Image (cartoon, coloured by chain):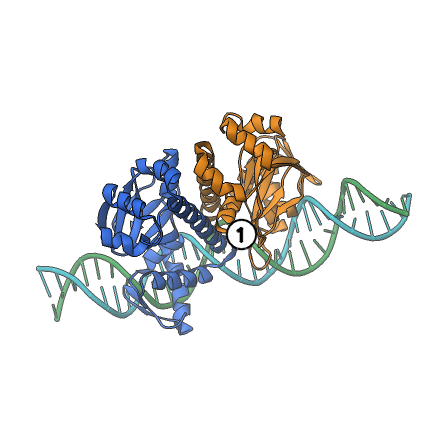
Chain colours: A blue, B orange, C green, D cyan
Amino acid sequence: MKEELNENYGTLFEQELLDEIVRVGTFKEVPEGIKLIEIGEYIKSMPLLISGAIKILREDKDGDELLLYYLEKGETCSMTLSCCMSQSISEIRAVAETDTKLIMVPVQKMEEWTAKYKSWRNFVFESYHNRLNELLSTIDSIAFQNMDERLLGYLKEKSRINENKIIHNTHQEIAYDLHSSRVVISRLLKKLEEMGKIELHRNFIKIIQL
Amino acid sequence: MKEELNENYGTLFEQELLDEIVRVGTFKEVPEGIKLIEIGEYIKSMPLLISGAIKILREDKDGDELLLYYLEKGETCSMTLSCCMSQSISEIRAVAETDTKLIMVPVQKMEEWTAKYKSWRNFVFESYHNRLNELLSTIDSIAFQNMDERLLGYLKEKSRINENKIIHNTHQEIAYDLHSSRVVISRLLKKLEEMGKIELHRNFIKIIQL
DNA sequence: TAGGTTATGTAACCAATGTTACTGTACACT
DNA sequence: AGTGTACAGTAACATTGGTTACATAACCTA
């Protein structure tokens, strides 16, 4: 665990804090597709991402989903943090987007570390800052963009996150993430293909030039 | 300033912190409609709300606006906080929704107080928590609700914030807040009037029963 | 290879929202 | 009282996105 921690957080945290994390944290490997957090759950520990990516989703009362953003290596989930601090239930669902490695830190340490370590405070604040900005971007896209622009953004982001020109998703899955319908997504994807930006195949999409 | 501070924050903060706030803070009265923060500005001080309400807005590149949420007494602006901590520019606009009293605290104190006062840390974290949840609600409404539901929610919230059954806004102003158009809002308001929920007048709307 | 299953393509239609254009009306100012 | 301006009502139309329905294609398994 020590090596993985150092790789991502070595320069960020004091040695003393790094030692503490190794002492109280648990290393965890999560395969793609596994759910980490469900809406309504109480949170007992906080994830520090080592590698991979986690997809954060919102769901409404009718079960309609919407992708909020991705967490990547070196990041943590402020939502979870936020829940930890206030002893409240999770407002979001978290699912591993790729195979992911992370360290789980027990909530009890949060308060203590925030008082004790400047680097931890900075990390927490930066994390909140990033998450607020991610949510603003999400709001921008649903409020100000049309579905074709949102789809394009989705493909770009997905390709970046997975470091891959191939996107392994069905049209239906994309429709869920964007809170749209399969037919609409197929329609728009076809247009993108006609524009030469992508190539459509069964179960995957190849990015040509976005 | 001391009395106003105690009224809202007296039980929240330690005496020592309250004294510090009085020492370094500046009391400010802001009339309705006055802009407090503009997008792109650097933030030099943080507002603690004593009374009134502040409207937080997002704007896209074409100048289209969207109301994000309101700040009320006893709250602070995490967005501003977030900017302060990371020395970055404001992503939002803040406008006084009603006549507002607040205390401005210089940014330099943030880091210091977060290390020193547990109550301040709690306040800051709770503030972030609330703001994240407000943004999630905003996302819910634009992603999952139709315009008629959003309008109804808007009228309810506005009436609550202003503690008044009369809403002093033109249809155009409401349209800006909801990022819609005047004609659409007029149409939907007329329906609400036909349902007996509101009464329409020039420059104001009377809430009957929402 | 046949038959079942899942993913995709596409047309036709519908609903919600946005746009344009014009009308009427309240209010302020002179 | 007369006039100009801002606000509101409304019809007609355009656009976007969602829905239904069905056809076709890819893949999987026996």
Instruction: Tell me the chain of label 1.
Output: B
Any part of residue A97 in sight:
no
Task: Write down the residue under mark 1.
Answer: B91
Q: Quadrant of the N terminus of chain B?
A: top right
Crowd band around label 1 with a 10 angstrom C-alpha radius: few (<14), some (14–19), many (20+): many
Tell me the quarter of the picture where residue C1 sits: bottom left
Could you tell me how many numbered marks the image carries?
A: 1
Residue B38: give x, y in percent of width and height. 60, 51
* Kind of residue indicated by mark 1: Glu
Is A191 rendered above or below residue B177? Answer: below
Tell me the quarter of the picture where residue B122 sits: top left
Q: Residue at x 27, y 63 (%)?
A: A203
Any part of residue B98 in sight:
yes
Q: Is residue B172 left or right of residue A67?
A: right
Residue A44: give x, y in percent of width and height. 29, 37
Q: Disc 1 on helix, strand or loop?
A: loop
Q: Quadrant of the C terminus of chain B?
A: top right
Q: Residue placed farthest to the front in the image?
A: A15
Q: Is residue A52 left or right of residue C13?
A: left
Q: Nearer the viewer, residue B159 or A54?
A: A54
Is A11 rendered above or below residue B157? Answer: below
Q: Residue at x 61, y 37 (%)?
A: B193
Residue B125: give x, y in percent of width and height. 44, 38
Tell me the quarter of the picture where residue B174 sits: top right
